[in-house]
Image (cartoon, helix red, strand yellow):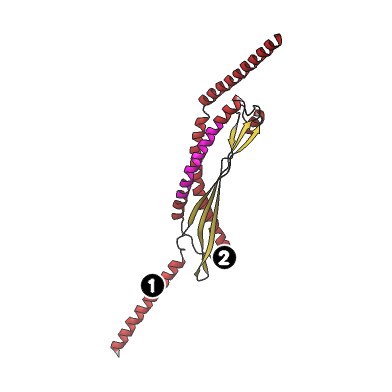
Amino acid sequence: MRKYSQFFLCFSFFMLATFFVSTSSAYAVVDRCPRHKIKTSVKSKKLKTKFLRASVQGINEYLNSHSVLAFVSNPIDVIPELKFRLKDIGYGRYCVMLDEVRVTYISAPRIVMPKDYKKSSCEYKLILKHENRHLNVHYKYYDKSVGQYKAFLGRIARDVPLSVPVTTSEEAQAVRDNLEYYFIDKFYTQVGKSIAEMRKLQDKIDSKQEYTFTGRKIDRCAAKEENKDLQNSKVFLETRDE
């Protein structure tokens, strides 16, 4: 009988220990939400370049400048969309899971050209050539950055911090807000860096040397027009004399 009691006592301790271990493990899982499995994607949309016209005075008033003949506006737009869901983990608790991040990346450049010059004029063609250089830089940047943004989204998704379980809708919304802020802040930091790189390339096109060179060529355009008018006037006078 004594031998049986010792066995029963050992068995009871074993079962009790197993209970505490399994219970504590269960609560350890409940106290921390599982890792997010986030699907990321970038949808690129290239819209057709729009050509607008305005006076040189209007262009400079708009840009708060005094020496601009034309410009490229609204080149890109980055629109992120995050999708969440609630996962029931028992004990009246839920986990806010970030399931998907989709980014729509839009290229929508507009060239604003001066209506002070005719489209067939030497000046207009020269200015348009300069603005097309800006467009080429933009499109090269855009094509390159689509892949960069996809890779960066994937890296952010792997490092999103774990969240704690929630029991109320207010707690769930707070977790959503924190996750969204984390993801968007990280992503737009990268977007800002890449746009800064593009601006450096654009600034090279608008260097003082380029403006001086373009200005001289525009002066030559004007000289050609004056010479052409002079030649036409001579022909007109000679014709009348005859």
* Mark 2 residue element: loop
Closer to us: 22 or 70: 70
Residue at far top of view? 241
Asked if 191 appears above or below 51 in the picture, the reply is below
Residue topped by disc 2: 168
* Mark 1 residue element: helix
Residue at far bottom of view? 1
Q: Which mark is residue 21?
A: 1
Return the x and y of residue 36 as percentages of the image width and height. 47, 60
User: Does residue 229 appear to the left or right of 172 in the view shown?
Assistant: right
Asked if 95 appears above or below 54 in the picture, the reply is below
Return the x and y of residue 240 as percentages of the image width and height. 71, 11
Residue at far right of view? 240
User: Does residue 91 appear to the left or right of 224 in the view shown?
Assistant: left
Magenta-highlighted stretch: main secondary structure? helix
Q: Quadrant of residue 126?
A: top right
Q: Rounded to the nearest whole Å, what is the CA distance between mark 1 and mark 2?
A: 29 Å
Return the x and y of residue 35 as percentages of the image width and height. 45, 61
Q: Quadrant of the C terminus?
A: top right
Q: Amino acid at mark 2?
A: Thr
Q: Residue at x 55, y 62 (%)?
A: 172
Q: Amino acid at mark 1?
A: Val
**Highlighted magenta segment, given as a residue range:** 130-151
Return the x and y of residue 217 as percentages of the image width and height. 55, 22
